[in-house]
Structure formats: C-alpha cells, structure tokens
Amino acid sequence: MRRLICMLLTLLFICSPALAEQTPYVQDLAIQPGEEMEIRYYLPTLTEASLALTDEAGAQLYPILSPRTLIGGLHVLKLEPDFFGEPLAEGRYLIRLSIQDAAYTGALTVGDPDAAQAAQAAQAVQTQAVPGSEITPALRSSHRPEHENCYWCTPMDITDEAAVWAMLTAPVTYVDIDQMKQTVIYAQPDENSEAIAVVTGQSQALHVLEELDNGWTMVETYSTSFFNSEVKNWNLFVTGYIQSSLLKTREVNQRCGIVVDKLTQRMYVFLDGKLETTLRVSTGLYNEKQPYNETRSGEFLLVSFTAQIKDGNVIGDYAIRFNAADYVHEVLYNRNADDTKNYKPYEPNLGARASHGCIRVQRRANADGYTMKKLYELLKELTGKKPPYVKFVIWEDYQGRQIPIPADDTVIYYNDNGKGVNYHSTANCYSVDKVHRPLTAFTYGELDTGDYAKLTPCPNCNAPLRVEQIEEINRIHREQSPGQIMELLNK
C-alpha cells in the first residue's frame, strides 16, 4: 500500500529568483534506489494542484498527489521508498506539478551519485539564501512590505535589542469581536470563498497588506484554530482576506513587551527598552491525534488576568490570557492528598515542548530573581485593573533558524565542594545554598574536560546548553520547521 510519511508541510519561504517572480516550480531531486524521496514544490497562491511522476518524455507513470486545493507557499512532500509499490529503477524521471492548464516539472534522478551531490549542494545554497538571524515571521510570505517596527517584518533575532523593543511597542491591528470568539479569514475577498484560517478577537494581531475598495482587507497571520474550530488549519501561516469593518488599531503598553521563542523555548521580558530577564518555558507539544496542541505563533496582546486555570487536579497559577483559551501561566502542579503542590510531573519538561497550547513558565527564581509570579505581579503593577494590552509575540521555529553556540571563553560557574551536579550562568544562583555562594568560575570551553564533563546546565538560572544539545536542536532546524504541523495527508 502506497503511503505518505511524516506530513505535507508548507515550509520555509526562501529568497530565490523563482519566488521573486512568483512562478510555480518543482525542485530538482536526486536519490539512490530505495531512499526516501522529499519533493519540494512552490505555489504562489492558494490553488488547485496535483503531482505526478512521469518518464523523461512526459508520459505519466504514477500519480503522486491527486488534484486538491492547496495553500500558497513552499511545500514538502515526503514519500516512503515503497510509495510506488517498489523502489524506482535507476534512471531519470520528471515530477510534474499541474496547475489548471499549466504544468511545471522538476528532474528526478535515481542512482546517479554525481547528480545527488549536485542536488544537495543546490538545496544547501538555497536554504542558506536567508541567514537564520534574518528570518522574519513572514518569511513564507510572497509579499515583501517594509513596514517600520512591524512584527512580521522584524528579524527573529533577540540580540538586536533596539529592533525588538521597537516592534514590541508598535501599534497592532486586531479583530474587534469578543476575546473568547473567533472569526475566519477567506481565500478571496468573498464570503462564499474558502475559509482558510481562524483568528481570535481582541488579542490576536494581523499583518495588514492592503485595504481594498470593496470593503475587504488583505492580511497575513497564523491560523489559531482550536480542536473545535470551523477551520482545521493548525498554526498555518496564511495570506487571505477579512472584512475591513472588523478591524481596529490599538496602541500597546509602552513599558513592557514579551517574546516567546519556540526555537529556544525561552521567554524574553523587555522592560523600558531593555531585555530585563529570560525565563524557561514549555510551548505546545502536538501529536498525530492532537495537532491542535501546537502553540499558535504570531503577534498577540495579553488581554486579561485570570489568576488560575484548573483542569480537575491540574492547576496553573498566575495565568494571563493571550488567545481565547490559551494562557501564559506558571508551570502546572497537582494537588497532593495533604493539599501540597506536586510539580514533579511537569517541571522537568520546562525548556522543551510539553503543553497543550498554553505557555508554561518557570516558578523557581532565575539569575535575575524572576519567576512567573514576579512577572505576573510586575504586569499587574504596570497596568492595574485595566486590560494589560502588553504585546506578547511568539516566534516560529522556522527551518534555517539556529541557536548560536557560546564562545569558549564564556564564564560559567559551579559548586566546587564536590556535591554540585549543575553548572550555572551566575555566581549567585538562587538554587544553590547561600553557604556555597558565590560559586567558582570556569569557562564554557572547559565543559568537556575533567569533572566538568559530568555537570548539567542549571534549569533555574538558564545556564547555556552544552554544545551537543545545541547542535541537535540546530540539526533539526536545518531540516524542518517543527512548529509547522498542518497535515495535508492524502487520506
């Protein structure tokens, strides 16, 4: 039985001549017999398309993807080696992308090592066309506006403090409906066209591209579909249309702004123009049965203090709503029989995907003395009883983004009494007893030597990960965009 593996993913937009000209294409591909096949093809807009394997003369050999409506963007389709019944024989083929009356082809070479090496080199060059530090939230977009201080146009680079702060304090455009309600974005400026995304009222911001004369506005966003939403496009980046009468613009809090980065699984809190502190988080962990668990990326506002969320015996304190049923809150706990709090099922997962869509934040003090509780109290102090309207943005971990490896001379610390199991980012980490502080300094470059090799990064003061941990995260992101999980499987 022919099967698709993994998923059809609308992947990363790459700056290339094909994209600039808005021309559909299929990327050339070379594999060895029996290898998995990864077909990359580009659609400039939402359209009906199909894929087929042909011989060099164009005669169809096998259908790959039956005609269906697909979102615009760069797609990847992964096929198992037995997708065509048995591995393809060595030789040259074509992969044909059919769109209405037009066809576009890419070469498929099976069994030629030189062709495979050339195809891999071409793909590497294309992937590197946009450096990881310059990738923006709208990288997939076919539009290239230069909006000043725009979330969608600002590179996802936390080291550029001035650019991030300018983005965090810029006004937002949102849908003026109840914050617990959602509406749809359409493929065309027509209510009878396909609904391609869901957007949440009050809290979710949209990227305005063009206001039309017919009462519609072209926008971009990530679909914030929940399990029961009308449109099932989980966290899909889309360009579409919404009625202009629904849109309003709002100023945001000018004292504070927050970035959550799925790549690093960290929260970056900015206060009065400066990066104030960094906290460990857990964003959503999806699975095949629950793709809607992925935390939706995009530009949001914190709209209401809820104090606590509760699901049976599972509780999260210091909760603030940012997307209808999604909250940022302290790491979860269970109530023990004696009414004490048990964080053990949830706390070890901080720093990695683990939630059902909410964003869990550390409760133990970091190097700056911050916790979710302290952040909650700070936001309450800054905004009072009014809706906080603090900008809260979530960066997607797109393919191509990378975590930099710390320099060897980066100073880190450890407890030299022989009992310490962690290394730390500060000499006065709150997780270490006062009698052992300040801790002893050494360098990141020494981590793999002697007794240092046994140490693990402190989860509280956010000590840098080891080289091998960073390299594994970076390896994954050279190959995929883990947060983009929209399934387009051939059922």
Image: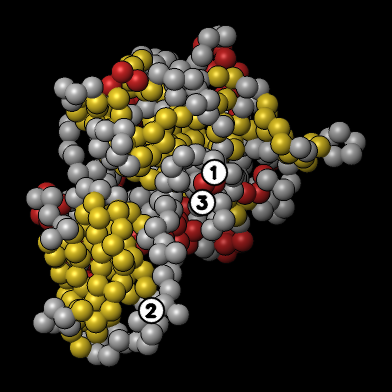
**445 or 33: nearer the viewer:** 33
How far from the left and from the top, in percent, is residue 464? Answer: 49, 48
Q: Which corner quadrant holds the N terminus?
A: bottom left
Other residues around mark 2 within 10 Å, as few (<14) / some (14–19) / many (≥20): some
Determine contact: label 3, label 1, CB under 8 Å. Answer: no
Question: To which residue does mark 3 refer?
Answer: 291
Q: Report whether 101 appears left or right of 184.
A: left
Q: Label 1 is placed on what type of residue?
A: Phe
| Residue at (49% x, 58% y) in the render | 469
Q: Label 3 is placed on what type of residue?
A: Pro
How far from the left and from the top, in percent, is residue 9? Answer: 36, 57
Other residues around mark 3 within 10 Å, as few (<14) / some (14–19) / many (≥20): many
| Residue at (39% x, 33% y) in the render | 184
Q: Report whether 489 appears left or right of 214.
A: right
| Residue at (13% x, 50% y) in the render | 22
| Image quadrant in which you'd find residue 193 | top left
Q: CA distance from mark 2 to mark 1?
A: 31 Å
Q: Report whether 152 appears left or right of 264.
A: left
Q: Is residue 485 above or below residue 30?
A: above
How far from the left and from the top, in percent, is residue 66? Answer: 31, 66
Q: CA distance from mark 2 to mark 3?
A: 24 Å
Q: Disc number at residue 227?
A: 1
**344 or 145: nearer the viewer:** 145
| Residue at (30% x, 53% y) in the render | 70
Q: Secondary structure at mark 1?
A: loop
Q: Earlier in the sequence, mark 2 or mark 3?
A: 2
Question: To which residue does mark 2 refer?
Answer: 83
